[in-house]
Amino acid sequence: MIPALLELRGIQKIFPGCIANDDIDLTIAPGEIHALLGENGAGKSTLVKMIYGVLRPDQGEILWRGKSVQIDNPASARALGIGMVFQHFSLFESMTTLENVALALPAQNLDLLRAQLEKTANEYGLKLHPDRYVYDLSMGERQRIEIVRCLLQDPKLIILDEPTSVLTPQESDVLFETLRKLVSEGRSILYISHKLEEVRALCGQATILRGGKRVDNCVPAEETAQSLAEKMIGRRVEPLQNREASILKQKRLIVSNLSKRSDELHGTDIQDVTFTVHAGEILGIAGIAGNGQTELMAALTGETGPPQSGSIEIETQDVTAMTPMDRRQLGAVFVPEERIGQAAVSNLSLVQNSFLTAGKRMGFVSAGIIDWSAVGAYTGHILDRFDVRATGQNALASSLSGGNLQKFIVGREILQAPQLIVVSQPTWGVDAGAAAAIHEQIQELVANGAGALVISQDLDEIFSLCDRIAVISQGRLSTPRPAAEITTEAVGLLMGASNHASGDVLANA
Amino acid sequence: MPLEMSLLTLEARATPSVSAAWLSPLLALTLTAITGAAIFLIMGKSPGIALYIYFVEPLTSWSGLSEVLVKAGPLILIGVGLSIGFRAGIWNIGAEGQFIAGALLGSAPAIFFYESVNPLILPLMMLLGILGGMGWAAIPAILKARFNANEILVSLMLVYVAELLLIHLVQGPWRNPQGWGFPGTRMFPDAALLPVFFAGYRIHLGTIIAIVVPLLVWFALAKTQFGFQIQVFGSAPLAARHAGIGEKRMIWVTLMIGGGLAGLAGVIEASSTIGQLVPKISPGYGFTAIIVAFLGRLHPVGALLAGIAIAVTYIGGEGAQISAGLPKAVTGLFQGIILFYLLAFDLLTRYRLTRITISKNAT
């Protein structure tokens, strides 16, 4: 019998206050794509960090080709033949592809390396230009640099952390071909994801973690997405109810020819964006991260000042030059992408965080004095209605898990009974139960006549939640189309569109 | 060949304890006393007696207590103003300059109307003192709000401008014509001096103001929307922006409060204990108040207590010069040691020291 490439036995890792990994076994055979599944906080990252030598296990044994090994640091992991592609890329934006690859390897001749890079890239179908600067590259291209960089060290085991979270569906298909080629050469892949359909299509084995423990080991192809989700979450999942859209004539948000420069170096400028959100509808904006979503959100809230050109109307009032507070007074609420530090302040209590955006609109201030007992009652209402698990109203925002904090933030905004809600990445990193609750609340608000704009990278979310869909790519927005009339493929093409031709692709799709 | 290195490193604590945050000033003061004892020993003085003169004797008599409170006044006023700015992350280091600017503008009525008996001259002086400090702080405010210039550097450099302006005025245009050529303005008329309350003691109206202001600021920070905005702006600027708390407004408001209170302290100092403008109207109050703000945990009531504690070292220092023959520099030394220990304890409440081993594979 061929020994397993990598075997973990009884791995345990304890952090102050939590057992991140408890008695975990994992076996990866040569030439296998092995999925590591689990919700946020299930212990996937901790486990992977121990395999890659970033952390050391407190207990348990790691066997590499049948021999017990100790992996002290990433360098010794690489020396064994373990490579890793992180979810967050470690690339220097102001350097070229070739320079970034060279930095990660021992010093060598650049011309030689260029030849090597091109050869490896061609062999695995990874299109790359050695001399292009990274800031100019799409997320998919950046990921290819990371993969090539990893492959140049000839790894036997490649760890991929949520590789498709930054890719269009088409780019994902290209990646899967590359991965299948790699395993056909006898390499193994440890594939971390929570996209269950792609795990079913791609992976031969799956290990499922929940709450730091290994709960199951299965062959994904023999399961359904539903059954995998239930193993991950530990209970039944109700699919999202389809909602009868009753789009009204009334316009909640009108954005016309909006152009705004990004505040960030290498950020994406918003160019000539036009759309309308009606009462009773959810408009979805799909797109890969970094295509202007953050800038669009900031332009809508007004927090980065007035745009260079174009106009924004909330409840048919021109708000282009208004402050965030005045826009909220008109009935708009916002849930930004960053929870800690933007939507909420980590070292403030939940009561204080309620006041942050609800204070003025809900009338908690008179003559400059805050009525904290009224804010407390409001906060209690949020915690009850939205099932926020916290030790109480005075718990610090930083003490809540990601999903609970997001429920709190969404609750804080929805309970203000807005006419318009703008939400960015509503369920990113949120567990399935909380995600369903957040979706339901947005739907209920809209059913009562509000308008909603949902900006999300998650196509499943966009398609299940939204009545009309537009795609943002390089700061430009396609013409919104009814969800029933477009396909995932068409949206994917628009997401990857580098030379934008407005809604044409959709029109022809 | 693997190379093993052992290093000390700082690791963030999961939950910094709240009680430790208030314990660290007390520990810092205790360790300062111990270090002080060692220094006195090296200097050949009896540590017991020297420490007694420094830290206890000022508090053993009514006149000593009165002197401590009078000395604490400007430290408290400036320290409270700085606390507000520091909470918001606006680092006004130039309170000394704003103190002098307040003293200059606030003293102008007393110098130009040196025979005035009008009781309104005093409120006018206080108002001008506040405006003088605000005006001086407006320079870093406008440069930061418009051009994002670093307020630490701008406000600090303006201290020296203010000092030179003061020296120029008291030696030139504002010099007392009957002063035998000594640098200094005319003595202020009685109407321009802050009233004292107890015969034989120097406690004056300004001392009372310095005790009331921290209480008002405490209320404002805890109960008002403005206090909340300062807290949010200081701990999460992006959240502040998202919630519509304007950055420029916070820069202006915090610098105006800090500058205004420093200016008020300046004119109070000129119109009480000194009674005129002299080249050296401040023994570094504006800088020492930075220690007061941090020792008081950026809390207004904390600044009140810290101001009194630091004032004890000033008064004790004067006593030590007279009765124990210790150099004046020891006072500054003590203040420096307090800040040093305080910052060290603050670091250790938020981080712990751990030893890590790095092994480096030579390739």
Image (cartoon, coloured by chain):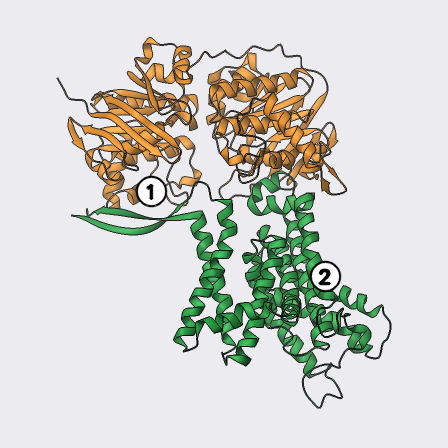
Residue A506, compared with residue B318, is above or below; it is: above
The residue sitting at the bottom extreme is B180
Which chain does orange denote in the image?
A: A
Return the x and y of residue A215 as percentages of the image width and height. Answer: 34, 17
Pointer 2: what residue?
Answer: B209
Residue B224, position as x, y percentages in the image: 70, 44
What's under tag 1, amino acid-wise? Asn
Q: Which residue is mark 1?
A: A100
**Residue B60 shows up from this direction:** yes
Q: Position of residue A68 (x, y in %)?
A: 17, 30
The single residue placed furthest to the front in the displayed view is B60
Q: Which chain is green?
A: B
Q: Is residue A256 visible?
A: no
Which amino acid does the dot numbered 2 rest on? Ile
Comparing labels 1 and 2, the label whose residue is closer to the camera? 2
Of A78 and B264, the residue lying toward us:
B264
